[in-house]
Image (cartoon, helix red, strand yellow):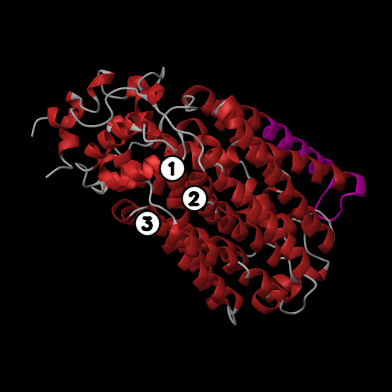
Amino acid sequence: MAGSGVAALGVKKERAAQYKGRMTLAVAMTCLVAAVGGAIFGYDIGISGGVTSMDPFLEKFFPVVFRRKNSGRQNNYCKYDNQGLAAFTSSLYIAGLVATLAASPVTRNYGRRASIVCGGVSFLIGATLNAAAVNLAMLILGRIMLGVGIGFGNQAVPLYLSEMAPAHLRGGLNMMFQLATTLGIFTANLINYGTQNIKPWGWRLSLGLAAVPALLMTVGGLFLPETPNSLIERGRVEEGRRVLERIRGTADVDAEFTDMVEASELANTIEHPFRNILERRNRPQLAMAVCMPAFQILTGINSILFYAPVLFQSMGFGGNASLYSSVLTGAVLFSSTLISIGTVDRLGRRKLLISGGIQMVVCQVIVAVILGVKFGTDKQLSRSFSIAVVAVICLFVLAFGWSWGPLGWTVPSEIFALETRSAGQSITVAVNLLFTFAIAQAFLSLLCAFKFGIFLFFAGWITVMTVFVYFFLPETKGVPIEEMVLLWRKHWFWKKVMPDMPLEDGWGAADDAAPANSNRK
């Protein structure tokens, strides 16, 4: 078929100024329920670090680490260097990577709700296995099931939030996912602080309580309305319009509805979204789907969140003090996300990402200098320098919480056209989990090898990502999700990458016609 058939499809012009609607109770409630998926993700990040510092847990599953930790003769940087212990943390993320690729066709063909429910059920199974674990194999299997839950939940929830939110509030509402994630991390740290004194089974309570948000996510997912974008894409056009009118609080939704219908017309011609996403017209979005989640992890934040108690113990803090410090960092992360929610739709994505990146670089360098000068393989930090390290790490976490933390998820979830949205979000989650797995598996060994230089390693990456945002990320504030494709054609760099095409002509392009038609019957 000729390329003109595809050229007639897709969003053809900007209608953002004609969008009507307001923040409704229906949107607020559905976003709150959906965001519970973020709470489970955060809980699983936060809980593992505390549990792996508990002696009863180490003695049962990792006796070598337990003996090394309590021997008093081991290098401070290397006492927790154990690949089995790292595998306990990182197995969740490699399982999530595989699961999110499987979640893409489920999300596209059966709706966002279906993936949310699948994620909740997997979380329930994983929490049960972890709480009842009697050997390492059962423990790892539970972590793998939690990973499957993360793969489905993280694939569907950000998409759900982006599609339900009005364009002018999308940034703040999408960040409900990250806010819930930070709340999950903070809650996990508090629970670990309490259960460390419940011996010998406190760790079981810490791991098993993941079932509570998992149950909320599963039950809530059954009652959530499907997004109008997904309904229209799957041919339920009138139902999609009814849902759109309900969540916008008005019957005057013609402009937004037209954008969704035009986007779905193109989406329904695409049989292979993962193949389609490689075409020239999708290069900018693909670059962001890879770079944004990779950079988010390369800030080093997960190293602090996974291993905060272990990291602080390595720096000479006592067991209680290390868990207390990790509770503090969790509280800072949660509160800083509120700052981002309140400013992202006013200041925009770029300003937050760049300012946060600069602050994080400064903090990483300061921590590296303090540890390099005042801490070594056989000496402890003084009280004053210990307080200084925690304070600077909190400033680092604060910067992450208003910038790369929420926006590392928000930006990729809002930039894809409907026909590649599920595939694009799967790539985002897969890259995030791949880098999370790599850092989780390697961090304890890197800490042992690099010592204080680990913080300089991450500072270098934050510098790279801040420069990347400055030059290559256009501002997406206030741009309707179905018109986002038009934004790339105005950017100084990406307009050179994308095929030539007048804005009003939609998607078609002579040099892109063949690949586009290769996905059609």
Q: Nearer the viewer, residue 456 or 359?
A: 359
Indicate which disc, 2 or 1, sits on the residue closer to the N terminus.
2
Position of residue 509 in the picture relative to residue 138 (left or right):
left
Q: State the residue at coordinates (23%, 37%).
A: 266
Which residue is pictured at 55% across the width and 75% down the height?
A: 128
Mark 3: few/some/many CA within 10 Å (<14, 14-19, 20+): many
Identify the residue at the far left of this view. 1
**From the viewer's perspective, is residue 53 above or below residue 25?**
below
Q: Position of residue 412 (x, y in %)?
A: 45, 39
Q: Residue at x 45, y 33 (%)?
A: 21
Which mark lies nearer to you, 2 or 3?
Answer: 2
Of badges 1 and 3, the one in the foreground is 1
Is residue 366 in the magenta section? yes
Query: Is residue 69 positioned above or below 166 on the image?
Result: below
Q: Which mark is residue 205?
A: none
In this view, the residue in front, 210 or 62, is 210
- 102 falls in the magenta region: no
Q: Nearer the viewer, mark 2 or mark 1?
A: 1
CA separation in Å, label 2 and label 3: 21 Å
User: Mark 2 — residue?
Assistant: 30
Figure quadrant of the C terminus: top left
The picture quadrant where one finds residue 467 is: top right
**In contact (CB < 8 Å): disc 2 and disc 1:** yes
> How far apart in space, not on screen, are marks 1 and 3 (Cα)?
26 Å
In what element is the residue under mark 3?
A: helix
Farthest residue in the front direction? 251
Element class at badge 1: helix
Residue 155 on image: x %, y %? 43, 51
